[in-house]
Image (cartoon, rainbow, N blue to C red):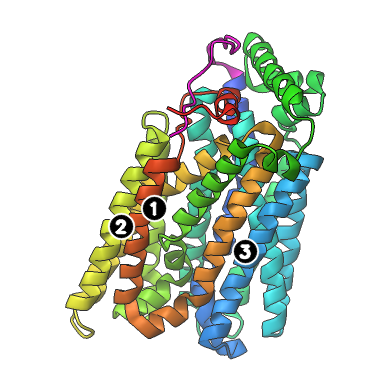
């Protein structure tokens, strides 16, 4: 375990205080998290759009997986590309670029006449989703005071599940009212254009990350931004702490990017740990439920129309779990939260597999028991794993490689997500719910071992204190 306790050389940081700066911080966070809302809607909308799309475009099980996973593979590359652009071009301008990409990708998908074109549109959306999943958490972490960094950064994950819930609700309404009409899936996808416009317009009035500005030597601009979201005394003290950390790193290493990572074994280690955190989160299968929840529920025994409405239940519990997670984020250590989350989700996996084996198809209790267990799994995942995963990924990388390190970790996360998304329909068709969820349970046990052995603690420290301990390689 890596020790990230503050060092004696750290600058004394005054209390955060109250006042207009706290409200301004909340407004800036809200605007930035529209990227998370888009992330959630674009990944969740396929849950209800896939079956009508399948009928109109003549999709097979494999091409269903391709349509779903094309966004995810795009997201894997978008995560790395977005991280690199954000390190060089700035967090704010990168998010503006992502908003445009969201809008263009949506138009391509809505107008797509064939399978090939819908895949192109989904890849464009994936690039935007992956970029947002890297850059928005980094921007929030760099803007947030350390006392509330977890709950502020975690708002992005809450917005993701709100976006997914919105997709499920929109799908249910559109599918119920216009379900018999051709092209209903196009209407479902078109709704995504609205938050894309809101993100672009909102980010025009949002300042750049103060830590990115300071890393480029633009200290006056960094102080001006901090002055919008801190008291004047606190802003000066934080900037001094950032400058001290940057000067210390400059004396150790003058390169940036990949050379910086590969030249320090502790940076290599923390990048690998970040990648492991991201992959473990995806191997719970959470996004299989978010993408293919209707298919899982149909497999369990629900009628197709009932399954479409029933997918709302996991979406609702995800939002409730996210709200609970934000309320506890500053009271529970990050690692403790992850251990509890993997314990609960692994139990749910084994219970779902057991229920699908014991309650044979045709048993009237089967669909309802499996729905209840799926809801319990999603609730456990959202309360203890999803928000904590994204928060800790935004905290553990040093400033010099923060967006790059986040991009690498999220690239691995999205690659795992894409592979699961590609093969999930085929796996369920081959081994059923039983084999699928028993497999997720075994992976959950391995994730528990990984978290306890390798994941560092970062709650209650400034990003500079975390950075100093990690790059120095101090172990407990």
Is 18 included in the stretch rendered in magenta? yes
> Mark 1: which secondary structure?
helix
Q: Residue at 56% of width from left, 35% of height from top?
A: 395
Q: CA distance from mark 1 to mark 2?
A: 10 Å
Is 152 included in the stretch rendered in magenta? no
Mark 2 or mark 3, which is nearer to you? 2
Q: Residue 447 got which mark?
A: 1
> Mark 2: which secondary structure?
helix
Residue 86 visible in this rendered orientation of the protein? yes
Q: Which residues are magenta?
A: 1-20
In the rendered structure, the answer to whether residue 151 lies left or right of residue 25 reads left
Picture quadrant of residue 260: top right
In the rendered structure, the answer to whether residue 250 lies left or right of residue 446 reads right
Question: Would you say the residues marked 2 and 3 are in contact, meaning their CB atoms lie under 8 Å apart?
Answer: no
Image spot of residue 448 (x, y percent): 35, 49
Mark 3 sits on what residue?
191
Q: CA distance from mark 2 to mark 3?
A: 35 Å
Q: Residue at 75% of width from left, 36% of height from top?
A: 205
Closer to us: 224 or 352: 352
Mark 3 or mark 1, which is nearer to you? 1
Image spot of residue 78 (x, y percent): 69, 57
Picture quadrant of residue 140: top right
- Circle 1 Cα neighbour tier, 10 Å, few/some/many (<14 / 14–19 / ≥20): many
Closer to us: 22 or 392: 392
Residue 162 visible in this rendered orientation of the protein? no
Q: Residue 346 got which mark?
A: 2
């Amino acid at each position: 375990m890596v020790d990230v306790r503050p060092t004696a050389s750290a600058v004394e940081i005054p209390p955060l205080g109250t006042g207009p700066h706290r409200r301004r911080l909340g407004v800036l966070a809200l605007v930035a998290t529209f990227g998370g809302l888009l992330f959630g809607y674009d990944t969740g909308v396929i849950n209800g759009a896939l079956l009508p799309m399948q009928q109109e475009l003549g999709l097979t099980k494999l091409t269903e997986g391709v349509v779903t996973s094309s966004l995810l593979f795009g997201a894997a590359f978008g995560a790395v590309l977005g991280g690199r652009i954000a390190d060089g071009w700035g967090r704010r301008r990168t998010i503006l670029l992502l908003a445009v990409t969201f809008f263009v990708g949506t138009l391509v998908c809505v107008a797509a006449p064939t399978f090939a074109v819908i895949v192109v549109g989904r890849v464009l959306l994936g690039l935007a989703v992956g970029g947002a999943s890297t850059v928005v958490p980094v921007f929030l972490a760099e803007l947030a005071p350390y006392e509330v960094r977890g709950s502020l950064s975690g708002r992005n994950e809450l917005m993701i599940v709100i976006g997914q819930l919105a997709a499920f609700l929109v799908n249910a309404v559109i599918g119920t009212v216009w379900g018999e009409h051709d092209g209903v899936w196009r209407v479902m996808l078109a709704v995504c254009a609205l938050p894309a416009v809101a993100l672009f317009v909102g980010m025009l009035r949002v300042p750049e990350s103060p830590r990115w500005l300071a890393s480029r030597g633009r200290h006056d601009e960094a102080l001006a931004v901090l002055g919008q979201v801190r008291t004047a005394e606190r802003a000066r003290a934080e900037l001094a702490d950032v400058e001290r950390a940057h000067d210390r790193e400059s004396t150790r290493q003058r390169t940036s990017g990949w050379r910086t990572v590969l030249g320090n074994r502790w940076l290599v280690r923390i990048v690998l740990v970040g990648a492991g955190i991201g992959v473990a989160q995806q191997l719970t299968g959470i996004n299989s439920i978010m993408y293919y929840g209707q298919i899982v529920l149909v497999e369990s025994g629900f009628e197709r129309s009932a399954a479409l409405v029933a997918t709302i239940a996991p979406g609702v519990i995800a939002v409730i779990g996210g709200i609970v997670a934000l309320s506890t984020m500053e009271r529970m250590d990050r690692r403790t939260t992850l251990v509890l989350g993997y314990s609960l989700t692994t139990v749910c996996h084994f219970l779902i597999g057991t229920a699908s084996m014991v309650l044979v198809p045709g048993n009237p209790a089967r669909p309802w028991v499996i729905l209840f267990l799926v809801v319990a799994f999603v609730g456990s995942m959202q309360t203890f794993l999803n928000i904590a995963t994204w928060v800790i990924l935004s905290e553990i990388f040093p400033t010099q490689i923060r967006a790059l390190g986040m991009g690498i970790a999220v690239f691995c996360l999205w690659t795992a997500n894409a592979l699961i998304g590609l093969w999930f329909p085929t796996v369920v068709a081959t081994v059923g719910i039983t084999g699928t969820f028993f497999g997720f349970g075994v992976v959950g046990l391995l994730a528990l071992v990984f978290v306890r052995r390798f994941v560092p603690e970062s709650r209650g420290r400034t990003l500079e204190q975390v950075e100093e301990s990690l790059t120095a390689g101090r172990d407990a």
